[in-house]
Each structure stands twice: as structure tokens, then as C-alpha cells.
Amino acid sequence: MSFRDLPLELVTIIVDHFYDDTKSLNLISLVSRPCLAACRTHLFKIIRMNTLNPSFNYKCAFWSAFLKRSSAVLPYVRELELGPPVFQLCARDFTMGSSHWVDVVDSGLPSIHNECVELILSGATNVHRVALRFEYQSWKNFSPSFQRAVVDLIRRDSVSSLTIEDIVAFPIQILSHCRRLRDLSLFCVDSTPDEFNPMQPPRSVDLKDVPKGCLQSLTLFESDSCITSLERVLSAPESYLAASNLQRLSVNMTGSDGQLALMELSNSARSITTLELRYKYCDLTGFTSLRTLFISISYYSCYRPLQALALFFTKFRSTSHLTELSILLRLEVENSDRSSPSSQELTRICSSKDWQLVQQSLVLSHSFLLLNKLNIVFRPRDVATITSDYLNLSLHLCLLQSMPNLYALTNPTIKIHDGA
């Protein structure tokens, strides 16, 4: 029996064994047409076009040429990440980023507004995870065909995770049709105030016959303008999407918004087990099922963040189900002592006697009996000076001396976050 005569099921088993070995999959795909069909499920799972020009233009040209020869690979795509995070990439290459940003502003259209990307959006009929970045351009400037391609992609039943970034006047109402959506992230999204969505087709199915989708994870960053519209979508009786079983809520942890989201989504508080938010807006009232808390608070020379956290945990002792606590300590640059290196700032915080107050409120008061994991995340002014293992060990020793009981109970981890 030749390799071409093998049963398709056996070919699939062989290919699945090499699912993460691209080189082997490329070789196997050359053996026969059944092997090529099986390899496609692994070779073309992800399409990422997330770099600045000229790399972005190069990728578009590559995919345009490739899809002309074999557009049949698009149904095998499971993850799409389209569009550059322009300001993050500008920080790495300011000259190229600035030039690219000027081109985007002059055209009034994002980089992904082209025929190649539109073809990918239309052909990815079985995609699961989608991330679209629109580079702060207005939805109203997009062509009707591109709008339709985006709307059809978002409403696709296969989509379970959706990330929308950097867009103006986005019609948030189109999410009401996403009955299979489980994970939604909105970064810098400005929603149109219009209640009527011209892209919305008339309903032909009785909602009583179609089960509603239940959103499980929601991330919001600098998107307060769309919170009210989103809440209406999630609570509307005619919507296919609801948040009655929301498990995770993450609101802006570093900027100025977030409070409105907590107010509008208060009806989902009882089901939430993971909460990420800033200390300024933190109120655990109603979060009766909370297991994991990620709280962000600023630090500088004239402020005692640990004392504030200790008082906070003393106030909300009723959260007895909490098992994991993460504390993000952000340096407020405008209030910092620039003459002090970042390593000294972190050592000063880890050596603070205020950790004893935190230990008292979390452990010695017997209010959080299930707590067994603590993560401490720093976002200092300069991350380049704090990459040594010696400093990491030194910080752990400082914590061990400052809060021995809490350290023994949770074995804390220390991470450095650059804010990107």
C-alpha cells in the first residue's frame, strides 16, 4: 500500500502528531493531496499582520499573491490578528512610527482597509479568535464593502474571542448578534451614539427559538464612551448576547476611566470570579463569588499605597472566597524622584513596614482564610535597570522580613511590567 492509499483518518493522526513542527508539516504536505489537506489545519491556523510599514505592506502583498493561488486555506484559519498597535510600535521605532501615523491620518483609513484584508475577513469562515486594530480612524470613513466584511466577521458563529482596538464611532450594536461570543475586549473604542444601526438586517428568527450567548470575560480600556451602549446591548431582550454569567471583568487599570463600567455592569457582580481594576474605583460590594483580584495602585515618595490597601482590605473582609491576589504598583512619573534609580524605589517599597499592615488585614485577622497566592507586579519608570537575578532575590528577602506570615502562606511572585 502506498502512502496515497492510506485512510484519511490515519493521515490525520500522523499529521496531528506534528502539529507544532512547521518544518515537518511542510515536508508532509508535499507527499500527497490528502496530506496537504490535513496539514492545512495546522499550517494556516493563524494570520498575523501586526507590524508597521513597510513590513505590513509586504505581508499584504505576500498574502494577496498566495490567496490568488490557494484561497481554500482561509476556512482553516482559527486566529486573526490584523492591524498594528501603532503607539506601542512607535515607542520602538519613533521615525517609522511617526511616518506611518502621518500616512494613516492623511488617508483617514487604517492600514487594514485594503482588498487583501477584506478578502481574508470574508474567507475566514471558521475563525475563533479575532483582533482588529483600526488605528484611531472613524468607522464612518470605511467603505461599505469593508464595513460589511467586518460586521459579517464579528457576527460569525465561530467567533468566541473578539478584540476591537483604536476606533472612532464604532457601532457597538452589532455585538447584539454575537450569540457564541465568550471573550470581549475593547481598547480605546469610541461608540457611535446612534441607537439604530444601518448594518443590522431585519430579524427572521424568533428569539424564543435561539439560545442567548453568555459573555464570560470582558476587558475595557479607555472605552467609557461605549459602556452605556454596551450595557444596553447586553441587557436588551432582543439581543442574542447577555452577561448574566460573566466570570471575569477587567476595567482600565492605569488611566482615568473605569468607574462607569463598574456602575453599568453592577448586575453581573454576583457571577464574577475574577476582577481587575484600579484601587481608586475598587468597591467589592456585591462581588460575592470573587476568587481572584488584580488591583492597581500608584506609588511615589509622598504616598503610602500599602497603608491604603491595608485599610481597603480591612473594610471588605466579607470577601472570604478570595484565593489569589495580585497588586500592581505603578510609578506616577510626575510625582517621582527622578534622581533615585528604579532598583532603589523597588527595594524601598519591598522593605516598607506597611507590609505588616497588609499582613494584618489579610492573614492575622483571619478574614481571608482561602488566600494562598500573592503576585506583586511593578511598573517602574525604567525597567532596564531591574533585570538582574540578584535584585529579584533581594526584593524577595525584603518581603520575607517585612511580612513573614503572609510570605509563608502565599509564596509571592515578583514581576516587572513595562506597560506595553
Image (spheres, grey):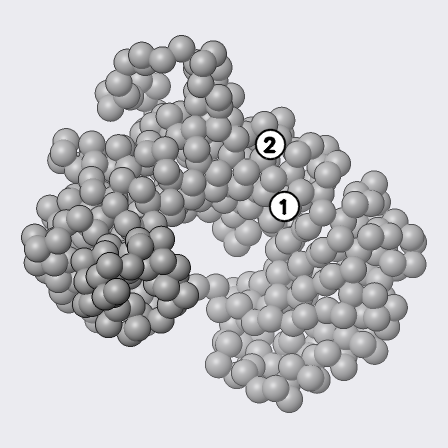
- Asked where in the image residue 395 lies, by quadrant, the reply is bottom right
Amino acid at the residue labelled 2: Asn
Q: Which residue is mark 2?
A: 245
Quarter of the image that includes the N terminus: bottom left
Q: Earlier in the sequence, mark 2 or mark 1?
A: 2
Quarter of the image that includes the C terminus: bottom left
**Callout 1: SS:** strand
Kindly identify the residue that appears in the image at 87 percent across and 68 percent down: 405
- Disc 2 + disc 1, Cβ < 8 Å: no
Q: Is residue 50 positioned above or below 152 on the image?
A: below
Q: Is residue 412 left or right of residue 247?
A: right
Q: Is residue 250 positioned above or below 271 on the image?
A: below
Q: Is residue 17 left or right of residue 279?
A: left
Q: Which residue is mark 1?
A: 275
Depth check: give the residue in front, 202 or 343: 202
The image shows residue 14 at horizontal and vertical percentages of 37, 64
**Callout 2: SS:** loop
Kindly identify the residue that appears in the image at 62 percent across and 26 percent down: 267
Q: Is residue 110 visible?
A: no
Q: Is residue 108 positioned above or below 31 on the image?
A: above
User: Farthest residue in the front direction?
Assistant: 1
Depth check: give the residue in front, 327 or 225: 327
